[in-house]
Image (cartoon, rainbow, N blue to C red):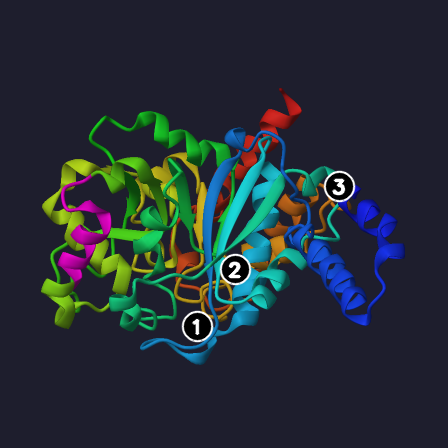
Amino acid sequence: MGVINLLKSKTKYLKSSQAVFIYVALLYLLFMFNQTKFVPGGGNGGNSKKDLKFLLILCGGTGTQGSKQASDLGRQIRQAEVMLKSAVLFTKKRLHFHVIADSKKLFGRLVNRTTGWPEGFKKKIRFTMHDVWYPEEREDMRSMFRVCATERLFVPDMFPSMDKAIYIDTDLIFMRPPEDLWSFFDDFSSSHIAAMAPCMYHYGSERNKVPYYGETGLNAGIMHMHLDRMRDIPDGWIGATMAMHDKYKKRIKLADQDILNILFSFYPEKLYELPCEWNYRVWLCSQGGNKCPGAEENGVSILHGNALAFVKGNEMKIQTVFEAFEQFQLGVDSIEQLHTQIVAGLGKVDREDLPSKCKAVPGIDKILLGEMEKHLQQRKNP
């Protein structure tokens, strides 16, 4: 503001209309320069080094695959709001979401969903927008599969000073604190550069035409990224992933997920495998049983609504959890009330025989709620 006062003090010396114009223009430019980025609940955020960093990607338009519903921005924003709500509900840390978006309007739509939250929850979360970026020679990958689905492959070079972050899809629900997910970085050996959970579907079938990691492949909806190590692999991260893309381009169906599977099929020692309960999807309970022993033993840690499972209406056990979180009001309802609502909704699926293949799995309600119930028990007996 000192510069503005100085300019004001000099106005008596501005005699010509040209000088007045220059003065006004300088004031305007100074005003615009001092405007903070549209980051409600953000600001400098204190010591950002202590923030847990997550990466989200939001883009409009349609890609080469998927229905209109799959690309619907309204659905993506709804799901992202639920994901954010679940994250702040369980966390005791500060979460920094780096949102890679193709428009400020889209970024604003997401952030505005949190502006009405109570201050105690808003202070747990911080947003920063980043523009979508593709190397000039790779612009054709922007619409591959779904718009910007491949953007995450370029993240290590987009954030050269960032050491670690977790990429997450928007269609996730945390059933326990996000810091527990972050803690897997502590389990990395010196050779690990990333972590993902097993896919346990698709890659062992005839539909798949590419090499894949392990016995069942990897699902890329959640990915720990040790970015400094990723940048240091031979040929660099982009060089390595693009080599896989170029070699198998005609056989790739699932864009970045296929590319990551191909890469880690050649370098399995660089991948830390997350337990399957940290990325529990519809395919793990709708194919004639529960395919994730860890979820049966411990409960689901993150529920992933891929294949439109949160909104399509054909898997109501999973959609019921999403709808309960969506209706839940931070600062108004208690987590105990949320649990009660989910239990009632899951029971309704059985009583009214609503569409669901997962309901045939013995103990599916306990699988879905096991981690949440542990959290409730810890609240009662800290």
Query: Residue 21, how many percent across, how many down?
Result: 77, 68
The mark that comes first in sequence, 3 or 1, is 1
What is the quadrant of the N terminus in the image? top right
Q: Which residue carries the number 1 mark?
A: 70
Query: Which quadrant holds residue 205?
Result: bottom left
What is the quadrant of the C terminus in the image? top right
Query: Which quadrant holds residue 376?
Result: top right
Count the marks: 3
The mark that comes first in sequence, 2 or 3, is 3
Mark 2–mark 1 Cα distance, whole angstroms, equals: 27 Å
Mark 2–mark 3 Cα distance, whole angstroms, equals: 38 Å
Residue extending farthest right: 12
Q: Residue at x 26, y 41 (%)?
A: 230
Q: Which residue carries the number 3 mark?
A: 119
Mark 3–mark 1 Cα distance, whole angstroms, equals: 33 Å
Mark 3 and mark 2 in contact (Cβ < 8 Å)?
no
